[in-house]
Amino acid sequence: MTATEERQLRNISPYFFVEDIVRAAEYYRDRLGFGFDRYWGEPPCFVMVRRDRVQFMLRSGAFGGRPQPNRRFDPDSWDAYVYVQDADALHAEFRARGAEIVRPPEDQPYECRDFEVRDLDGYVLCFGQDIGAVAGDRKPQEA
C-alpha cells in the first residue's frame, strides 16, 4: 500500500467553548475517564482531554457568555458522536462515575447501540457501537 492509499484521516478533536475550564476538564476526567496533561494560558483557558484515540479541545474565556451547544438549536442533536467497542460497558462505567446520563443504551435503526451523556456546559456526547452491517470502512463489533 502506498502512502497515498493509506488512510489519511485518523481521528477528530471537537473544539468546545466552556464556562469554567478547570471544572470542565475535571468533569471529563472524573466522570468520563479522560485525562489531560496541562492547562494553557494564565489564567488557564485551554485544555485537551484525551481517552484512547478520542480528544476534546476545551476553551474558556474567549466567547463572552455561556456556551451554546447544538441542542440550543435542535433538542435531538448531539455535539459529538464517539464510536466505542462496548456501549453497555462504557455506560455502566459512566454511571458508576456519576456522569449525567441523558439516555441509556438503545439499539437504533441506524444499526448502532448508543447512549448519551451531558457535560457541565450542556454539550451532549453520544457513545455508540456498530451492531449492524459494515458502514464505510468500520467493521461491526463482535458480540
Image (cartoon, helix red, strand yellow):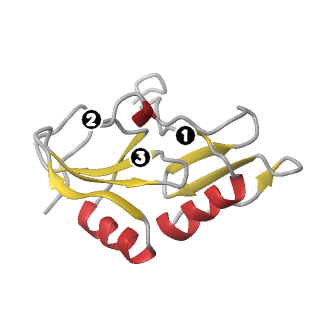
Residue drawn at the location 62% of the way across and 56% of the way down: 24
- Upstream in sequence: badge 3 or badge 1: 1
Q: Position of residue 51 (x, y in %)?
A: 51, 59
Residue 61 versus residue 85 in the image, above or below: above
Residue designated by label 1? 13
Please, what secondary structure does the residue beneath circle 3 have? strand
Q: Position of residue 22 (x, y in %)?
A: 71, 59
Farthest residue to the right: give it.
42
Residue designated by label 3? 124
- Upstream in sequence: badge 3 or badge 2: 3
Residue drawn at the location 13% of the way across and 43% of the way down: 111
Residue designated by label 2? 137
Three-letter residue code for mark 3: Val
Q: Nearer the viewer, mark 3 or mark 1?
A: 3
Q: Position of residue 47 (x, y in %)?
A: 70, 50
Residue 96's disc number: none
- Upstream in sequence: badge 1 or badge 2: 1
